[in-house]
Amino acid sequence: MHKLKLISTKAPKGMDKQATKTLLKHMTKEIGDYQHALYAEKKQSLLVIFQGVDASGKDGSTKKVFEECGTIGIDAFGFKKPTEEEFAHDFLWRVHQRAPAKGYIQIYNRSHYEDIIIQRVHKWIDLKRVKQRMDAINAFEQLLEFDNNTKVLKFYMHISKEKQRIKLQERIDDPARNWKHNSVDWKEALHWDEYMKAYEYAINNSVIPWHVVPVDQKWYRNFYIAKIVLQTLKKMNPQLPLLSAEDKRVMAEIQANLK
Amino acid sequence: MHKLKLISTKAPKGMDKQATKTLLKHMTKEIGDYQHALYAEKKQSLLVIFQGVDASGKDGSTKKVFEECGTIGIDAFGFKKPTEEEFAHDFLWRVHQRAPAKGYIQIYNRSHYEDIIIQRVHKWIDLKRVKQRMDAINAFEQLLEFDNNTKVLKFYMHISKEKQRIKLQERIDDPARNWKHNSVDWKEALHWDEYMKAYEYAINNSVIPWHVVPVDQKWYRNFYIAKIVLQTLKKMNPQLPLLSAEDKRVMAEIQANLK
């Protein structure tokens, strides 16, 4: 049972920032190599879900942790307010379409969890519906794992209220961040306690466990996520497919006929 | 009027490989910066089409030229043999779905041109249909440009017959490349002359012009493509949106009410 209030949003004391950053560089390279093997192998896939309040670092983590992965075989998709067509379907409809095919890493910036978080915060759905949706989410995520070899990694971006306020203010004050500013975020920030409650429910009722990431310092946040992603890819252990002696013999025959 | 036989597949004499590679590093960084601005701005988009025979370096160029772009706001999609559902629609149906939204760079590895290239080489369609499709392609690409501010860049990967053979053989001999091997490529390679004729038709009848890239040496290929991509992004000149004084005044009001 997670109580978010009891979990630190900061790096543990005594961590060396510079040493961690150096280590991260090696880790992102390794993540890049594994992604290449995953794509070549095409037998399994990885779904990475980032959830958290506004300015909690979902985009920044995507950029940094996967920076050595290139553009082939990996995609980051941000779920926005559903369109009319999407609203006319069940809440998992649009999410299912974006599930990764074998060989791919798919990143969700926000996800089906919004449908039990923002929807619950604003009381657009009742608690019975929240519970039904939670059950459907559990079934869906397990479907991906057992029926398509998709490993599901879920990160809750655990930011402090104070740090969120600072980061939202930076978007107003720093011209390079102006494009990220949205006055709606300030209104949502007023519902802090309800958001925490909704996240706790999701975290405590998920069959596939969440990773609660302390995100107040970027350098620690990136390291924390990269470590889990790397461990996961290592366990998945994707292998470059090799041609067998028989494959090569057949190929030599084809080539002999070509010339 | 392009005659592919008369265009070199190699770097011009006297080019300095090491100096070019160093320059490329700076160029890919610049491309990354422009992509970030394009994504922040969300007013225009870039479609990059790579076409060429097997092993002509479509994937490799994607990886290298866009390596500093990260995973957000850019996507590379490879068009394969159409599915049954796709075949049941017009040839542009599946392609249109993948067109980039404002703010995005979309890379096509193969494209709607396959429908007048492989289809023509194997005579699955007659010349009248080829011409009709070429007209439809011209209309489609111009639609993207005038109606969604999408700049369309098309690269024909110009490889020599000898270099293609060497690269296909490497896929058999080098375990790290085994996963790219496909015996079908060897059969397609037999149709070399028909492929060149089909590409010449596409290149000479396109309204939006093609770039014919000499690809026999990777280092020159990457430089050539990166240069055109960078020039194009510079001309597009995407701007980070800034908050106006009025925006900031309104925001201060909202914040005052929050506290």
Image (cartoon, coloured by chain):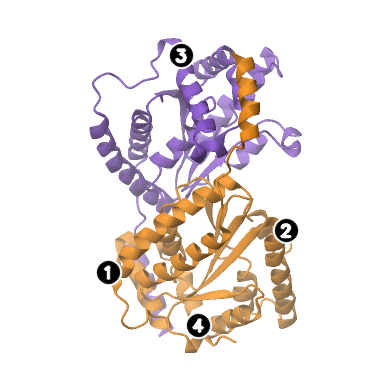
Chain colours: A purple, B orange
- Counting from the top left corner in percent of width and height, residue B204 is at 62, 82
Circles 1 and 3 on the same chain: no
Classed neighbour count for the residue bearing mark 2: other residues with Cα under 10 Å, few (<14), some (14–19), many (≥20): few
- Counting from the top left corner in percent of width and height, residue A206 is at 52, 21
Q: Distance between the residues labelled 1 and 3?
A: 53 Å
Front: mark 4 or 2: 2
Q: From what the image shows, is residue B44 above or below residue A56?
A: below
Q: Distance between the residues labelled 3 and 2?
A: 48 Å
- Counting from the top left corner in percent of width and height, residue A38 is at 40, 48
Task: Kindly identify the amino acid type of the residue bearing the numbered disc 1.
Answer: Gln
Sequence-wise, the earlier of marks 2 and 1 is 1
Asked if residue A121 shows in the view, the reply is yes
Front: mark 1 or 4: 1
Q: Distance between the residues labelled 2 and 1?
A: 42 Å
Sequence-wise, the earlier of marks 1 and 4 is 1
Classed neighbour count for the residue bearing mark 1: other residues with Cα under 10 Å, few (<14), some (14–19), many (≥20): few
Task: Kindly identify the amino acid type of the residue bearing the numbered disc 3.
Answer: Leu
Front: mark 1 or 3: 1
**Seen in the image, is A124 located left or right of residue A21?**
right
Closer-to-camera residue (A98/B24): B24
Count every numbered label the image shows and give the total. Answer: 4
> What residue is pinned by disc 1?
B18
> What residue is pinned by disc 3?
A4
Q: Distance between the residues labelled 4 and 2?
A: 37 Å
Q: Chain ID for label 2?
A: B
Task: Kindly identify the amino acid type of the residue bearing the numbered disc 2.
Answer: Asp
> What residue is pinned by disc 2?
B147
